[in-house]
Image (cartoon, rainbow, N blue to C red):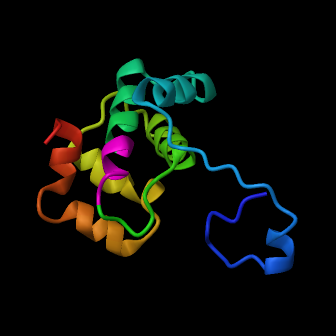
Amino acid sequence: MTSNRTREVHDALKRRCLYHWLEHPSFDREVAIIRRRLPDAADRLAGQVARAAQRLRTADLLKPPGVAESLDWTEALVALGVRDLDPDTAARTLGTVLKYREDQQRVLGGGVLDALLNGG
């Protein structure tokens, strides 16, 4: 069971829980997860999504993306026939990886998206 801190868990339940915090995977591990779950994704696309997600996690966001969002994003891109993630496509599909409007606006404004995709 996980709350992902989305809602408060009652103290009586907390006393009965074991806590184990997991860090986000390394870049290579995240690419491997994407490739295993979405084998139709191009290798380059899997790497681009993983790299962008890793960079988004270091941004000042309300909800940084997890691996589930990386998978959602890749799945959407594959469904659209994308093999190479460019800034326009990333901007149009950003809602699959960022769930808050404020986060999307922050990334879309000020050149943050270009920096994410181009290593800036």
Q: Is residue 12 left or right of residue 50?
A: right
Residue 54 quadrant:
top left
Q: Is residue 58 magenta?
A: yes
Residue segment shown in magenta: 53-59
The C terminus: image quadrant = top left
Q: Is residue 84 left or right of residue 6?
A: left
Q: Is residue 79 magenta?
A: no
Residue 94, horizontal then vertical, whole percent = 37, 55
Which residue lies at the image location 62% right of the left edge and 29% below the top edge? Answer: 37
Of residue 16 and residue 75, the one placed in the foreground of this image is 16
Which residue lies at the image location 62% right of the left edge and 50% below the top edge? Answer: 21
Residue 80, horizontal then vertical, whole percent = 44, 40
| Total numbered labels | 0
Q: Is residue 30 left or right of residue 52?
A: right
Q: Is residue 25 above or below residue 89?
A: above
Residue 64 quadrant:
bottom left
Residue 101 quadrant:
bottom left
Residue 115, horizontal then vertical, whole percent = 16, 46
Which residue is situated farthest in the front direction here?
A: 15
Which residue lies at the image location 79% right of the left edge and 55% below the top edge? Answer: 18
Of residue 112 and residue 28, the one placed in the foreground of this image is 28
The N terminus: image quadrant = bottom right
